[in-house]
């Protein structure tokens, strides 16, 4: 399997009022094509910072990030923005939909920004909306949808450019358990049907149990990892054991 993302000794050091915070402190990870990877860890352990480094939104203070073999430090400005738009789909806890655009226009946005022709945009949207069960909602606006529906719109938008990687930061954080399960089933199907690589930050053991592999972060470093050996239930049990080992009563891990 090809490596989609590889990091070599990445650190992110924030300096404020003479105090240095090592938010990410020497992380070496390799993410393979088609993987569904979870990142877990206590609050403040560096998960979001790491995801921002993997997604080219932020640059490491030290070390290198390779994305499809390209060292992202070699790209800047417009070139980097274009690379990101083509290669990465994003999913956030609060959906990040534009309220004054219809669902159709929200989904179309990444393609429109890339200058794709209207007829092709329509074709691509039609291909994906049935997968996410959104046919009936295309001409509505975000405020008319439930949280779960909004996150499915965000997932469709994330996938519309056929990116090599989908990066998700707490995508189930604002959803009730039924909507969370539906979204996770959809992400799992996306991973299986389109071979999309998914990297997901979560504090929630149930959410993480949908992954193939989970990396546990503490104080900016990778503490350990778990791989799915049999089924989701077994992985869920192992995640809870690992969280307990990390001093984690669950409510600390958010
Ligand atoms: N822009 C910044 N300037 C200074 N310090 C920062 C900045 N961003 C993050 N940090 C610090 O870096 C560390 C890691 O933060 P990060 O948000 O990556 O953790 P996290 O694991 O995602 O936390 P949470 O689960 O609470 O969202 C924390 O100590 C945080 O205070």
Image: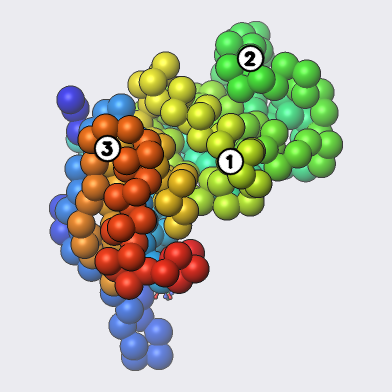
Of residues 115 and 240, the one nearer the viewer is: 240
Question: Circle 3 sits in a helix, a strand or a loop, which is it?
Answer: loop
Question: In the picture shown, does residue 190 fall above or below 27?
Answer: above
Neighbour tally class for label 3: few under 14, some 14-19, many 20 plus, Cα within 10 Å: some
Question: In the picture shown, does residue 50 fall above or below 32?
Answer: below
Asked whether disc 2 touches disc 1, contact meaning CB atoms under 8 Å apart, the reply is no
Q: Which residue is mark 1?
A: 180
Give residue 101's position: percent from left, percent from top: 77, 35
Q: Which residue is mark 2?
A: 130
Task: Tell me the distance, in whole angstroms, between the alpha carbons under discs 1 and 3.
Answer: 20 Å
Give residue 164's position: percent from left, percent from top: 36, 29
Of the residues tagged 2 and 3, which is closer to the observer? 3
Question: In the picture shown, does residue 24 fall above or below 226?
Answer: below
Residue 38 visible in the snapshot: no
Question: Circle 2 sits in a helix, a strand or a loop, which is it?
Answer: loop
Comes first in the chain, label 1 or label 3 = 1
Comes first in the chain, label 2 or label 3 = 2
Of the residues tagged 2 and 1, which is closer to the observer? 1
Task: Tell me the distance, in whole angstroms, between the alpha carbons under discs 2 and 1.
Answer: 19 Å
Question: Circle 1 sits in a helix, a strand or a loop, which is it?
Answer: helix
Identity of the residue drawn at 63% across and 51% down = 174
Give residue 63's position: percent from left, percent from top: 18, 58
Identity of the residue drawn at 53% across and 42% down = 91
Give residue 10's position: percent from left, percent from top: 22, 59
User: Does the residue tagged 3 have its C-beta within 8 Å of any atom of ligand 1?
Assistant: no
Residue 159 visible in the snapshot: yes
Neighbour tally class for label 2: few under 14, some 14-19, many 20 plus, Cα within 10 Å: few
Q: Which residue is mark 3?
A: 228
Q: Quadrant of ligand 1?
A: bottom left
Task: Tell me the distance, in whole angstroms, between the alpha carbons under discs 2 and 3.
Answer: 29 Å
Q: Which mark is residue 126?
A: none
Picture quarter with the N terminus: top left
């Amino acid at each position: 399997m090809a490596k989609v993302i590889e990091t070599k000794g990445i650190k992110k050091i924030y300096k404020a009022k003479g105090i240095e915070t090592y938010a990410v402190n020497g992380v070496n990870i390799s993410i393979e094509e088609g993987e569904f990877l979870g990142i877990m860890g206590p609050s403040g352990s560096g998960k979001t910072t790491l995801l921002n480094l993997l997604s080219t939104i932020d640059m490491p203070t030290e070390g290198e990030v390779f994305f499809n073999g390209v060292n992202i430090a070699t790209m800047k400005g417009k070139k980097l923005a274009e690379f990101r738009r083509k290669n990465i789909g994003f999913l956030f806890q609060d959906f990040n939909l534009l309220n004054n655009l219809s669902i159709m226009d929200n989904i179309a946005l990444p393609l429109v920004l890339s200058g794709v022709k209207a007829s092709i945009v329509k074709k691509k949207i039609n291909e994906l909306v049935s997968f996410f069960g959104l046919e009936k909602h295309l001409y509505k606006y975000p405020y008319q949808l439930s949280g779960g529906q909004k996150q499915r719109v965000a997932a469709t938008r994330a996938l519309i450019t056929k990116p090599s990687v989908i990066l998700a930061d707490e995508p189930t954080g604002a959803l009730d358990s039924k909507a969370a399960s539906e979204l996770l089933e959809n992400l799992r199907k996306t991973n299986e049907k389109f071979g999309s690589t998914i990297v997901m930050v979560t504090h929630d053991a149930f959410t993480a149990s949908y992954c193939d592999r989970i990396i546990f972060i503490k104080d900016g470093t990778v503490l350990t990892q778990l791989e799915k050996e049999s089924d989701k239930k077994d992985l869920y049990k192992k995640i809870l054991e690992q969280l307990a080992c990390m001093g984690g009563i669950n409510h600390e891990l958010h």
